[in-house]
Amino acid sequence: MGDLPAVIVSGIVSGSAYALLALGIVIIFRSTDTVNFAIGDIGTLAVFMTATMIAAGLPIWLGLIAAIITAGILGIITERTLIRPLGHSRNYVFIALVVTIGLGLLIHAGIFVGWGTRPQAFPVLIEGTVKLFGIALTWNKILAAGIAAVAMIAIAWFFKKTPFGIAMRATADDPVAARMVGIDSGRVAAIAWFLGCGIAAIASFFLAADTSLNPNLTLSPLFRAFAGVFLGGLTSMAGAVIGGFTIGVLDNVAGRYISASYRDTMVFAIIVLVLFIRPAGVLGAGRKERV
Amino acid sequence: MADTKTKGGTVAVAGIVHRYAGVLALNGVSLDVQPGTFTAVLGPNGAGKSTLAQILCGVLRPTQGSVTVDGVARTRRSRRAFVEDGVVLVPEGRRLFGQLTVRENLLLGAYGARCGTAEMHRRLAETLPLMPRAVQEGQERAAATLSGGEQQMLAVGRAIMAAPRTIVLDEPSLGLAPILIDKVYEVLGQLNEAGVTVVVIEQIAAHAMRYAKSLTVLDRGSIVYSGSATDDAAEEALKVGYLGHAT
C-alpha cells in the first residue's frame, strides 16, 4: 500500500475531468430540468472543430478558449432548438432526456462523417512529465487539473457573487417565483447551457491531449461523471464536483489494488450502495415536486 | 386625486374572463386602480381573487379581456415588462427563494426590475430600515429559516426593491398572527403615503379595511361591489355575508 498517495494523486488528476463534466450536467439540470446526455459529445465536437482551427495555425491555448466558446454556443443552440420547444409537459424530464441521448448519437455519427474514423493526434499545451510520490504524471494532466480547479472556482464565484448567478440559483430554487420577480428564464437557460457545455469542452480538450482525438473521447469519462453526479446529488454543484473527484480516486484505487478489469464494477458497486442509503445523493436535496 | 404626472404603473383591467381548463374563475371583471390609492379587493375563498391578482401583474394572461398599464394595452406582454413598468406582485404564500440568503432575496427584487449593481445596493440600504430586526441582522441567513411574519416582510421588502409604482399583495395576512399583520400593513401604509399605489387582496377584511380607501368585493368570479371603502354602501357590501369578519 506504499504507493497509495501516488494512486490518490493520480485519481484526483483524472477525477478533474469527471468533476468538470459532472458540474456541467448539474448546472444544466438545475436551470432547465434537463439531464443532458449529449454534453460529452457537444464538448467533443467542439474540440474536433478546434483541432481543425489549430491545424490551420491557431495557437493551442487560443484553441482551448475557442473550444469552450464553440461548445457553449452549441449548447445554447441545443437549448433553443431542441429543449425549449418541448415546453413543460408532464413527462418533460424524460422526453428531454431521450432528446439529448438522440442528439449525442447524432453528433457522434456526425463526427465520423466529418472527420473519419481514425483517431487523430492532438497537441498538448505543455510537454514533459513530473514525478510525484514516485509516479510519473504528465504536465498536461497537471495543467488540466489546475485549469479545472480555476474553472470551478470561477463558477462558484459567478453563482455566489454576481447578480445574474444569484438569479440563476433563484430560478433553480423556484422557477415560478423567479418569473414573478421578473427574472428572464430564457436568458438563465441560455447561460446555463453555455456554461455547462463550455466546461465540458475543457474536459474534452485535455482528454484529447492526454490520449488522442476520437469520437469516443468522453464515452467512459461521461459514464464516470454521471456516477459522480448521482453520488453527489443531481441538484448540488459542490456535490457534483466532490462526486467527480471521488469517482476518480475510487476508480484508481480499485484499478491498482483489486483488478484493472474490475474498475467499473467496483465504482458502480459503491454508487449503488450510496444510492441505496441516500437516494438523493450525499449532498443533494430531496427533490421537490414542481407545480 | 388622479395625479396624471405619477410616473408609470397604473393598472386597469376590463372585461376580464378567465377559465382554468374550462372552469370559469373570473367572469367579466373590470377594475380601474387609481394612482396613489390604497385598494382592498375582498372576497371569500374561491372568488377568483388570486387569479385577478395574477392577471393585474401580468403573471397570468386572461382568457378574454384587456389589461392596460398607464392606459396602454399590455395584455400580451411578459411578466418582466410589468415589473419594468413598476407593477410588482407579492404572491400568495410569499414564494421567497428559501435556499437563498435574505440579502440575495432582496437583491433579486431589484435585479428583476433590471437595475444596476450600484442602484441595487442603494435600494438595499433604503429598504432594510423598513424590515424587522431578524431580516436586518440576518442578511446571510437562508430565507427559509425566518419566521412566517419575517418571511412576509421579506417578501414585501423584495417587492419594494423593485421600486414599484403599484404593489399588489395576494393575501399578505394569510397564516400570520394579528400583531404581525399590523406590521405588514404599517409598511404598506408608509409606502402608500410615499405615493405608491397599493392593492391588497384579502379574504379577511379587518386589517385591509383599516387602511383601504377604495374597496372591491369579489364573489364567484364577479365584482359585487366597487367603490369607496369608507361609506355606508361599503359596509353594507361587507355585511351581505360573503365575509365572516366584517367590521
Image (tube, helix red, strand yellow):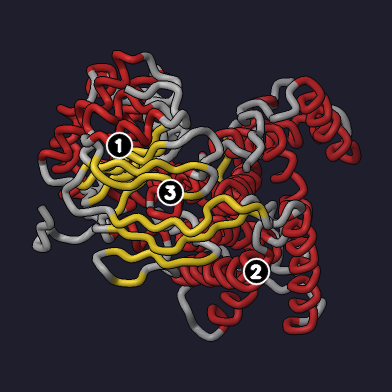
Few, some or many residues within 10 Å of mark 3 (<14, 14–19, 20+): many
In the visual, does B52 lie left or right of A13? left
Query: Would residue B144 appear left or right of B24 to someone viewing this image?
Result: left
Q: Chain of mark 2?
A: A
Residue B224, image x and y in percent? Answer: 42, 45
Q: Which residue is mark 3?
A: B223
Same chain under badges 1 and 3? The reply is yes
In the structure shown, which secondary structural element does the residue marked by tag 1 occupy?
helix
- Dot 2 crowding, Cα within 10 Å, few <14, some 14–19, many 20+: few
Query: Of the residues shown, which amino acid type is indicated by label 1?
Result: Ala
Quadrant of the image containing the C terminus of chain A: top right
Q: Quarter-wise, where is residue B184 in the image?
A: top left
Q: Position of residue B69 (x, y in %)?
A: 29, 64
Res B84 → quadrant: bottom left
Instruction: Please give the name of the residue rendered at 61% of the width and 43% of the height, measured from the top-left corner.
Output: A19
Q: Quadrant of the N terminus of chain A?
A: top right
Res. B240 visible in picture: yes
Instruction: Judge left or right: residue B205 versus residue A132.
Output: left
Which residue matches tag 1? B234
Tell me the SS state at disc 3: strand
Please give left or right for residue B49 compared with residue B225 in the image. Answer: right
The amino acid on which the numbered mark 3 sits, given as a three-letter code, is Ile
Query: Which residue is more in the foreground, B138 or A131?
Result: B138
Q: Which residue is disc 2 drawn over?
A: A85
User: Could you tell me which residue is drawn at 18 percent across and 32 percent down?
Assistant: B189
